[in-house]
Image: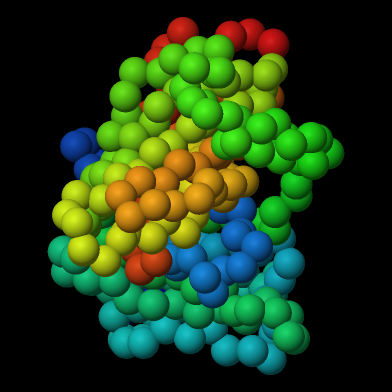
Amino acid sequence: MRPGAWFLLPVLLSLPATASTRAGGPVLQRRTLVLPSRPGLVPPLELRVAAGVPTLVLFDAPPLTESPVLVPEQERLPLRRLEDGSVLLLPTEDLAPGERVPLTVSLEAGAEPLRFVLVTRRDVVDVRVRVMRDHAPADEDGAELVARSLLDAPDARATLAIPQAVVKYDAPGSRGRVDSVLWMGRRFFVTLSLRDRKKGAPPWRLVQARLRVTLPDGVLWEWPARMLSGAADPWHQRHIVTGQLPEGVSEVELALDGEDAPGPFRPLLGREEPPSP
């Protein structure tokens, strides 16, 4: 472990989100992650770490001071608990390609612990990650009524105002696609369809849809979307995903998560969309 590297933390946290540690090196990211309502039912949240680069994880609700933060292999992945409840990681070496090291944090008595996995990516490193509770918009009940009406329509694609170029999501044994998008101001409704590739194969189970935007200050904001599912037949299932964009952003990415692994983010909208409120 290199003790002097801890003093790089204030400098790294002041860098813009697009800054690199060296020419051609990985991007130093700042992210805000909104917690799922049931963290034990969805894949762990991913933290991107690299040798010698501090990663600070802050919590909207600080972890219990008496509860341990569990991560195996402390020699490679040393961490410190700070006075405000945040966690500081400084790996002494990169993780191997494909390696995923679990990290568990307990927030409060009786609550499900938060599950993370530490990975090393060549292109990005997290220098600051803020973990927040979900705060549902005030119009969430009305949004669910609209989503259910779209889900119950005989052909949801025909009812949506803005047809969307196909965005495909491949998963083991299944293929998903975005059929279309409806905008209501900053609120959007996405129609997804999933189709199994092989008859008789175990169906791929979609457990969560996540959204990601880049805020004006360069911070990535990631949160679980509201998802309603239609009746499934042996080959096909349709879902409606709804979310609301924060002020000042115009592009959104969507990721579809299976039971054991998160899906990759893919751009959902073209440059011209959504229309201005």
Task: Residue 235: give x, y in percent of width and height.
Answer: 30, 50
Which residue is rendered at x = 21% and y = 63% of the image? 200
Q: How is the image coloured?
A: rainbow
User: Which one is nearer the viewer's eye here, 82 or 196?
Assistant: 196
The C terminus sits in image quarter? top right
Task: Residue 198: give x, y in percent of width and height.
Answer: 17, 54
Is 66 on the left or on the right of 233, as rendered? right
Which residue is rendered at x = 30% and y = 45% of the image? 195
Task: Residue 197: give x, y in percent of width and height.
Answer: 19, 50
Task: Residue 46: give x, y in percent of width and height.
Answer: 41, 61
Is 189 on the left or on the right of 149, as rendered? left
Residue 243 visible (yes or no) = no
Is 146 on the left or on the right of 23, as rendered? right
* Vertical order, 5 against 232 (above or below): below
- Point out the residue furthest to the right here: 138
User: Which one is nearer the viewer's eye here, 72 or 1?
Assistant: 72
Which residue is rendered at x = 32% and y = 29% of the image? 167
Residue 89 visible (yes or no) = yes
* Vertical order, 193 against 69 (above or below): above
The total number of labels drawn is 0
Which residue is rendered at x = 74% and y = 86% of the image? 109
The N terminus sits in image quarter? bottom left
